[in-house]
Image (cartoon, grey):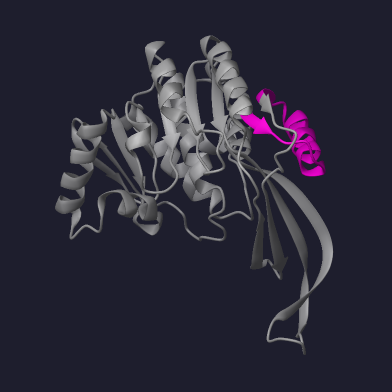
Amino acid sequence: MIPGPREIAACRVLVAGDAILDRYWLGSVEQISREAPVPIVQVEGEQERLGGAANAAMNLRALGAAATLLSVRGGDAADRSLQDLLEDAGIAWAGAVDAALPTTVKLRIVGRAQQLLRADFVRGLPSAAALDAFGAAFAQALPGHAAVLLSDYGRGALARVPDLIRQARALGLPVVVDPRGGDFDRYAGASLLTPNRSELRDAIGAWRDEADLAARVQQLRQRLGLQALLATRAEEGMTLFDDQGALHVPATAREVFDVTGAGDTVAAVMALLLGCGLTMRAAVPYANKAGGIVVGRFGTASVSQAELFS
């Protein structure tokens, strides 16, 4: 049964991981530079949005759920922008502060609604003291939540992710992991992994056909003690692998405009619905629908409760 607004509002999800500030410079392109064969963007506006784990939390808020974001904060101007956006969205923050850690910023330069360049400002990893504080905050926050979403963008907040998974599973909470890279061993014991096609290929190698894919994923799932694995496969849709076999859901997007943050949306919907008591097989069609909606929008985007359940 689809959860109602009251059930969703009562379902608090703990999102732990790497918060990112997504920054956009928007403008028009009228000519090519004489200095190099590149377009000249006349910048006319700027936007800042929540990215990474913060975008996953934003998706939960857009759906009407309560979200707590657990991350390692820096002490710079970008962090202040990030905190303002979280406050505006009604997202509670907990975690650790590492004043020497610059906030990860992804700057996208867009001309005529087309992304022309992305510049990543990525420096440093959290200190051991910050990770200690992060772990303590995680343990303290767990009991007040119905589900856990671990959003790994490789920036170090989830350096001790095996311990986080063990703590959450010991309390019986569903743990959804949006993984990074192809080393899935560190996510052993999670309820659900949501890798994209590229990440899954890095983890299990190239597959010959659907039967070979299923065999490889099921072997991985059993080895890591995962309840299920949801492969997001772009235009091919999504496939859930669990004890019952494989459940494939075709893609619903009519037009793909921007895939930025779509994985955050899928993971957020799965974590929310599992926290509300739905089975994974019942939740997958809604996650697929949400992913299909956000790829038709510009930048990191979210889906409303009305859109998802209409």
Residue sticking out furthest to the right? 44
Horizontally, residue 235 falls left or right of residue 141, namely left
Q: Nearer the viewer, residue 14 or 158?
A: 158
User: Would you place residue 125 above or below residue 115 in this image?
Assistant: above
As for residue 82 lying within the magenta part, the answer is yes
Tell me the residue at 71%/45% (across/down): 49
Can residue 73 be seen at all in this image of the molecule?
yes
Tell me the residue at 56%/10% (across/down): 144
Residues rendered magenta in the picture:
70-95
Toward which corner of the image does residue 230 lie, by quadrant? top left
Horizontally, residue 239 falls left or right of residue 253, namely left
Tell me the residue at 48%/24% (across/down): 148
Find residue 296 and report its horizontal and vertical position in percent: 56, 55
Can residue 6 be seen at all in this image of the molecule?
no
Horizontally, residue 294 falls left or right of residue 274, namely right
Q: Nearer the viewer, residue 97 or 56?
A: 97
Find residue 153 and report its horizontal and vertical position in percent: 53, 43
